[in-house]
Image (cartoon, helix red, strand yellow):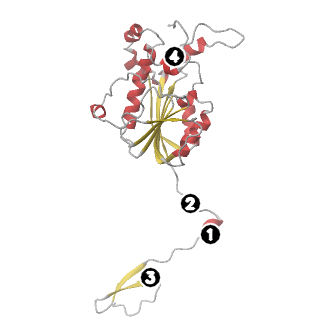
Amino acid sequence: MTQDAEIIELGPWLRTPAGRYLLGWEQAQIDKAVADVFGYHALQVGLPEIDGLRANRMPHRWVASDVLGVPEPMDLPPPEDQRISTLSPPLPLALHCLPEALPFPSQSLDLVVLPHTLELASDPHATLREVERVLMPDGRVVIVGFNPTSLWGLRQRLGRVRTGVGLGRGPLFLPHTGDFIGYWRLRDWLRLLGMELEGGRFGCYRPAFASSHWLARMGWMETTGDRWWPVFGAAYFLMAVKRVRGVRLVGLAAAKAPKRQAAPAVVANRHGAEREMRVDEPQQGVNR
């Protein structure tokens, strides 16, 4: 259950057997979520090694990263949905920027995908506020991240090395950059920003094995874990929509608001002709 050497960056770690196992589950969740999101502008923030927008059909797509250059793309598993596999959307354009300062106007994007972006950001609160700013009303955000309350999270805590103290118990299983954000904690952050949860689930229930052989032997834990201990999956997926509530006047503002005029009513005279007359106008000449 240990690795020969500690891998720091998340991108190289995703090429290990455990990383590919995790990426396969996350890619399937993202593909299903973004396939039915319609609009014109979609953005993926962080982790350019994967293609979180490959199943989406929006014409304008970007991948933003704070790393210069384009990393070598990963050999991703094919989409499970055959309808998605037949799509050929345009390749996303690469942007170099910080996740806390996206180069887009307010309310200009229909979809934002965050693959482990909040965990690796220097300020996850500012990153999430920036995502809320650029999203249009009813725009969607898709987030995947590591679950700290899981077997993988426990293995990571046991491998932590405190600087200058030396209380570590072996190399880390997961990349040590960034801090894991719990699923329920992230839901609270989204609610504070006026985001409404549309879907979420946990996955990857196999223990923290680095060997592909042992990961394959523990495949039976997927269905068992999803049924009996779903909140202990190694990763979680979450999708939220930006809601903009209507403005309602109260108090003095409501009293000063102009009153609406009565709607016109149609009244027939004795000759069968019709004319418009307000309901508060004296009804003269009406055939009774």
User: What residue appears at the point 60 percent right and 33 percent down from the top-left corner?
Assistant: 124
| Relative to 166, 137 lies left or right | left
Task: Find disc 1 in the rendering and name its residue.
Answer: 255
Taking 175 as reference, is 85 above or below it? below
Vertical order, 233 against 124 (above or below):
above
Q: Residue at x 49, y 21 (%)?
A: 11
The amino acid type, in three-letter code, at marker 2 is Arg
Identify the residue at image location x=35%, y=23%: 77
Circle 4: residue type: Trp
- The local secondary structure at tag 1 comes to helix
Mark 3 Cα-neighbour bin, 10 Å: few <14, some 14–19, many ≥20? few
Q: Which residue is mark 3?
A: 279
Quadrant in the rendering for residue 53: top left
Q: Is residue 270 shown left or right of residue 218?
A: left
> For the residues marked 2 and 1, what is the alpha-carbon distance in whole angstroms?
12 Å
Residue 160 lies in quadrant: top right
Q: What residue is shown with label 4?
A: 152
Label 4 vs label 2, nearer the camera:
4
In three-dimensional space, the C-alpha distance between marks 1 and 4, rounded to whole angstroms, equals 59 Å
Q: Is residue 85 above or below residue 140?
A: above
Distance, label 1 to label 3, CA atoms, is: 24 Å
**Crowd tier of the residue under label 1, counting other residues whose Cα lies within 10 Å: few below 14, some 14–19, many 20 or above:** few
Amino acid type, mark 3: Val
Q: Position of residue 69 (x, y in %)?
A: 51, 28
Q: In front: 62, or 37?
A: 62
